[in-house]
Amino acid sequence: MSSRISKFYQQSPEERLKKVAEFVGLSEDDQKILTGETKFTLEQADRMIENVIGTLPIPIGTAVNFKVNGKDVLVPMATEEPSVVAAVSHAAKYTYDVGGFHTSYSGSIMRAQVQVTGLKDPYFAMAKIYEAKEELLAFCNEQDPTLVSFGGGAIDLEVKMVQGDNEKNEKMVVAHLIVDTKDAMGANAVNTMAEACAPLIEKITGGQVVLRILSNLADRRVVRARAVFKDPFNGDQEAVDRFIYAYELAANDPYRATTHNKGVMNGITAVVLATGNDTRAIEAGAHAYAARSGTYEPLTRYERGENGDIVGTIELPLAVGLVGGATQSHPVAKTATKILNVKTAEELSGIIASIGLAQNFAGLKALATEGIQKGHMKLHARNMAAMAGAKPEQVDEVVKIAAEEESFTFDAIKKIVERLQS
Ligand code: MEV
């Protein structure tokens, strides 16, 4: 089936869910979990975190028009922000007929840091850790036979020297355990290994281990995506120029790059959240990666293509998984992930990166032309129409009139509702 669905936004939530269910084969039970008919209970919530008193429902929208590595996919996005789902679906339209998104992945490689302090001879200690590499990796792998049975586990060791900031001017040695976590995000696996091997590292070096924790700068778990956006400005060369100017500001100014990347993360975080992955891990990693040159830079790049096309790329670390954590324990996240129909963390990452690129493209396209407020207010108008007392069957008509009158203030919408109801 094709993910290229026109006027999806005009359907009711029930009709949309039916389409999505047909597309991926969701059962009746799955559908009830998504709609909330089967409740996410307080008991379930209480098993996830501490001191639970309630839950916060966030809408899940579905992005359409995505083709990633030749496969059509519908993408669940959990977000409270209007325009985000519409924007990615709009952007993906320009890519669909010219191949969609293509991605690559550096592997599910995470790193944990083991910090060794109190060393008189830090360079000597560093050499000793490197000598013990095979012993350390074997010891780490003994901690997680399941991961090893899936072909993952500790695969390498890097040792860094870090200058401390203390009055003794002491250097610290930091051992990086490099671990292939396969289809898990991997925090538990690498933290267990880091904690377990700390006494061994102390014995090898004679120092004292302080921190034993993964790094969220997952720079060996990098995803890249590219897409051609086919003539998005209908041959308007001036608009293409404005788009490229907008990108160039992000490429050369951290004030703009931050907002630019916020737009990227609007898309990325929504899918990360919908699939029950760790949004903070992804955000910390993305922003640190964006600043890896010493200057904060955009996560996406744009160039001029042929005949008014714009070609875009994105590159960022994405430590997301399909096993462990809320991806499986949260019934809604588990069901949302089913919609993606992915088997590996690599596939999931490729889709998330594509969403980030699409989101950012849509943001720049709007900013380079009419600005974002018009589209945003149009979507927000549905909410305002309901708040102003429009009956459900009147909402579309109210928004249509408001768009014709180019007037999206609450007062204007209220007057339209009153007119329709008088
Ligand atoms: C709003 O949530 C995101 C944007 O500000 C991103 C951008 O400026 O590129 C529209």
Image: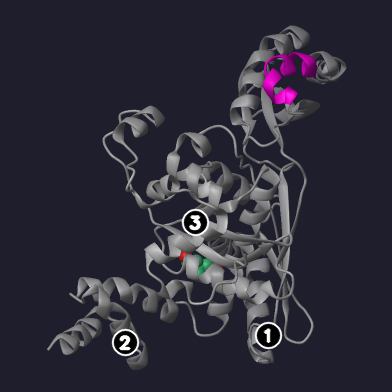
Q: Which residue is mark 1?
A: 241
| Residue 68 % position (x, y) | 69, 60
**x, y percent for residue 302:** 71, 71
Q: Which element type, helix, strand or loop, lies under badge 2?
A: helix
Asked if marks 2 and 3 touch (Cβ < 8 Å), the reply is no
The residue singled out by tag 3 in the image is 21
Label 3 neighbour load within 10 Å: few <14, some 14-19, many 20+: some
Check disc 2 and report the residue beneath it.
402
Write the residue at 41% across / 72% down.
Answer: 11
The chief SS type of the magenta part is helix
Regarding mark 3 in the picture, which secondary structure is present there?
A: helix
| Nearer to me, 316 or 381 | 381
Question: Mark 2 or mark 1, which is nearer the start of the sequence?
Answer: 1
Q: Amino acid at mark 1?
A: Asp
Q: Name which residue type carries label 3.
A: Ala
| Percent coordinates x, y for residue 283 in the rendering | 56, 48
* Picture quarter with the N terminus: bottom right
Magenta highlight range: 136-149
Residue 291 appears in view? no
Is 138 included in the stretch rendered in magenta? yes
Q: CA distance from mark 3 to mark 1?
A: 41 Å
Q: CA distance from mark 2 to mark 3?
A: 33 Å
Residue appearing at x 28%, y 39% in the figure: 54
